[in-house]
Amino acid sequence: MLRNDRERWGAVARGLHWSIALIVAVQIPLGFWMNQVYRQALAGEADFALLLDISLVHHTLGFVMLALVAVRLGWRFSNPAPDLPAALVAWQRWTARLTQGFLYLLLIIFPLSGWAALSAYSGEFPIYFFGWDRVPRLVPQTEPEVLWSYEFFAWFHRMGWRIGALLLGLHVAGALWHHFVRRDRVAMRMIRGA
Ligand code: HEM
Ligand code: HEM
């Protein structure tokens, strides 16, 4: 079943949930590695070509994920969403929905802040989408001293994984709690749709 109903997540919602989670799982270590290679390249200890290769993958995956998130939100609002079990009390519903809402917000802030940072960068650095290295700037290029500089947007990008780790911890703990403590179908319905 492709579409959701009041009981379960359809294949499209599940496919999008897990492909986005997979991209995030690749992007976080890749982002750290890219930063490390950047520092090494500045010190003459790594090849600049390697930095460009990693950047190509990091930017491209980020843009692909941004598109998937847009499709996911569109799908989410054009489909019913399964109800949480009636036995859950208000604070449990709020915790789940707030965590999920902030996760969605983060999925948008992550790629946009990375894109904006490189757009604002005062030097010349390619913004890649596959082989296309001239993705248009999201914000105007600025000098490092001004407020809306590379560092401003990069700060959001770097805060992203810290806040994301907290939210994801809460999110996964919730899924495990449903499965092992409450023994309801909430975790399994995102995995198998059952
Ligand atoms: C799925 C979305 C993305 C995720 C999860 C992600 C994640 C990360 C992480 C974890 C870092 C390392 C941060 C640190 O060292 O503290 C990083 C660095 C970076 N990413 Fe991304 N990224 C994403 C998309 C993008 C996109 C679309 C671009 C640009 C087009 C981009 C550009 C950058 C840049 C320029 C840095 C270096 C930032 C710095 O100066 O510290 N990222 N990313
Ligand atoms: C980067 C990783 C992840 C992100 C960004 C993410 C994000 C989300 C979001 C935004 C929702 C809300 C869906 C909606 O109502 O539209 C959701 C639902 C869900 N997620 Fe994740 N998730 C991630 C990883 C995981 C993992 C690792 C698990 C399991 C251990 C998991 C289990 C679930 C479950 C069970 C639901 C459905 C809750 C319900 O039916 O009400 N997620 N996720």
Image (spheres, grey):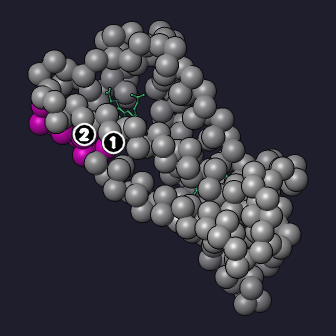
In this view, which residue lies farthest toward the front? 146
- Is residue 188 left or right of 104 when viewed as pictured? left
Query: 39 or 124: which is nearer to us?
Result: 124
Can residue 21 be seen in this snapshot? no
Question: x and y percent of residue 132 in the render?
Answer: 87, 49
On-image quarter of the C terminus: top left
Q: Which mark is residue 95?
A: 2
Residue span colored magenta: 171-182
Q: Magenta stretch: residue 127 in it? A: no
Circles 1 and 2, Cβ within 8 Å, touching? The answer is yes
| Crowd rating for badge 1 (residues with CA inside 10 Å; few <14, some 14–19, many 20+) | many
180 horizontally vs 111: left or right: left
Left or right: residue 193 versus residue 66 is left
Disc 1 marks a residue whose amino acid type is Thr
Q: Is residue 177 among the parts visible in the rendering?
A: yes
Taking the image in four quarters, ligand 2 sits in the one at top left
